[in-house]
Image: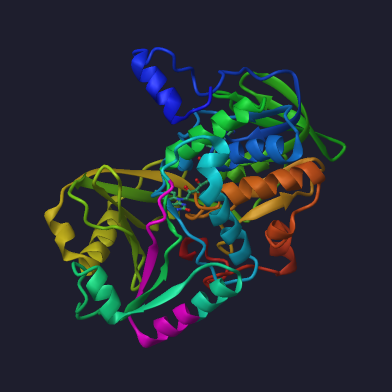
Amino acid sequence: MRYSLFSLLAQALNGQKGWKPAWREASPRAEYDVVIVGGGGHGLATAYYLAKEHNITNVAVLEKGTVGSGNVGRNTTIIRSNYLLPGNTPFYEWSLKLWEGLEEDINYNAMVSQRGVLNLYHSDAQRDAFVRRGNAMRLCGADAELLDRAAVQEWLPYLDHENARFPIHGGLLQRRGGTVRHDAVAWGYARAADQRGVDICQHCEVTGIRVESGRAIGVETSKGFVRAKKVGLAAAGNSSRVAAMAGLRLPIESHVLQAFVSEGIKPLIDTVVTFGAGHFYISQSDKGGLVFGGDIDGYNSYAQRGGLPLVEHLFEEGMALMPMLGRLRMVRNWGGVMDMSMDGSPIIGTTPVDSLYLNAGWCYGGFKAAPASGWCFAHTIATGEPHALNAAFRLDRFATGRLIDEKGQGAAPNLH
Ligand SMILES: Cc1cc2nc3c(=O)[nH]c(=O)nc-3n(C[C@H](O)[C@H](O)[C@H](O)COP(=O)(O)OP(=O)(O)OC[C@H]3O[C@@H](n4cnc5c(N)ncnc54)[C@H](O)[C@@H]3O)c2cc1C
């Protein structure tokens, strides 16, 4: 069923009785060409691009819960490509380009909204660092604009521009950045992959990876053994646990990240703003709630909920940036499990086990990467080789020292 204005009108006249489920409820078959573990944004996008770009349709996505119940449906929906380092910038810029054509490509309204992402700077040194970042972005074909103090003040007068500790000096703006309705991305990719023949198997937990003579030959699941010529892992916050099933120890720690939503108010913030003197970002959803978040909780956990110290820390940052937040009620908050890598950059590539491929280490920035990650992971699985765009994201960089440490924090995942 193709979604269009015509189908909307036809269903309206028909009492909305003709809508079909967005995808089939599949049970895993005995054997596939490719099995993807994890039905989040990355796993579903991988399955879609395997079918679309490589004509590999004998594929199953095995998801232990429901599609969208992981981080793909828990994030704060920001997309951008404002990275500095050579390994990162072209990859994230490719992702932004895929976002720009995504809704047409998968015939699904994901509410892609290029409302801009503005990173504020609060000192001369920070401005110089942002100039460097902006130039690196422009060299890779991404858009970047430096706004001075007056331009930011005119655009966003409600920020605390004269804050005694953190006065706002200006901002680096990426106009093509913005937000996307997060769970629609999962549903849209699931539907589009299903239409190309992929089996989306929900409530099917992978409990083991069968390896024979150094080669992955399939996975044990809560619904029995599923044989596969190739196995791709895209389990995000659970990556270490899933990879351990094949004897791999990953350079990843799992941490909790929280998100917050306020009561709905009239349109106020028409962009995404990040505070440069701490880690706090805020935007407004189409329903009117202010959506914001910041640092991870800082301790290892697999719980999808966070603690109060971080809540206090985050609200203090928010109040320093935007004092009017103090007049709002918070209505919801939740947590998700982050797969924090040791240099803050992802892993997409082969592993020491033949036919076993890994997609992990997304830290708190993997939502924006989902299209390019799926695209590159599909390429890597189909050809057995990384694409030029993900060549730097190899697992063995942690052994060879070719790290992509965007923040220069070293092996301290809680700081990335
Ligand atoms: C609060 C919060 C805010 C965020 N904000 C942003 C943001 O603004 N922008 C941005 O770019 N990123 C953001 N992120 C990060 C982003 O959401 C993640 O990096 C990204 O979603 C991870 O990839 P995924 O979508 O594939 O993960 P998930 O949706 O978590 O998918 C992994 C799936 O694997 C499944 N799984 C795990 N183990 C097994 C198993 N054994 N068998 C079968 N299935 C299994 C899980 O159930 C899960 O559904 C945020 C994250 C959180 C939590």
Place of residue 47 in the rendered image (x, y in percent of width and height, measured from the top left): 65, 36
* Residue sitting nearer the eye, 202 or 1: 1
* Residue sitting nearer the eye, 138 or 43: 138
Residue at figure coordinates x 37%, y 87% from the top left: 124
Residue at figure coordinates x 35%, y 15% from the top left: 13
Q: Is residue 368 visible?
A: yes
Residue sitting farthest toward the left: 327
Residue 213 is drawn in which quadrant? top right
Q: Is residue 236 above or below residue 408?
A: above
Place of residue 115 in the rendered image (x, y in percent of width and height, measured from the top left): 37, 57
Place of residue 28 in the rendered image (x, y in percent of width and height, measured from the top left): 66, 20
* Residue sitting nearer the eye, 75 or 250: 75
The part of the chain drawn in magenta is 112-131
> How is the model colour-coded?
rainbow
Q: Is residue 93 left or right of residue 77?
A: right
Q: Is residue 18 above or below residue 299?
A: above
Residue at figure coordinates x 69%, y 37% from the top left: 52
Q: Is residue 118 above or below residue 296?
A: below
* Residue sitting nearer the eye, 68 or 355: 68
Residue 151 magenta-drawn? Answer: no
Q: Is residue 188 left or right of residue 179?
A: right
Residue sitting farthest toward the bottom: 124
Place of residue 234 in the rendered image (x, y in percent of width and height, measured from the top left): 61, 41
Q: Is residue 206 visible?
A: no
Q: Is residue 109 left or right of residue 271?
A: right
Residue 117 magenta-drawn? Answer: yes
Q: Is residue 81 above or below residue 131?
A: above
How many discs mark residues in the rendered view? Answer: 0
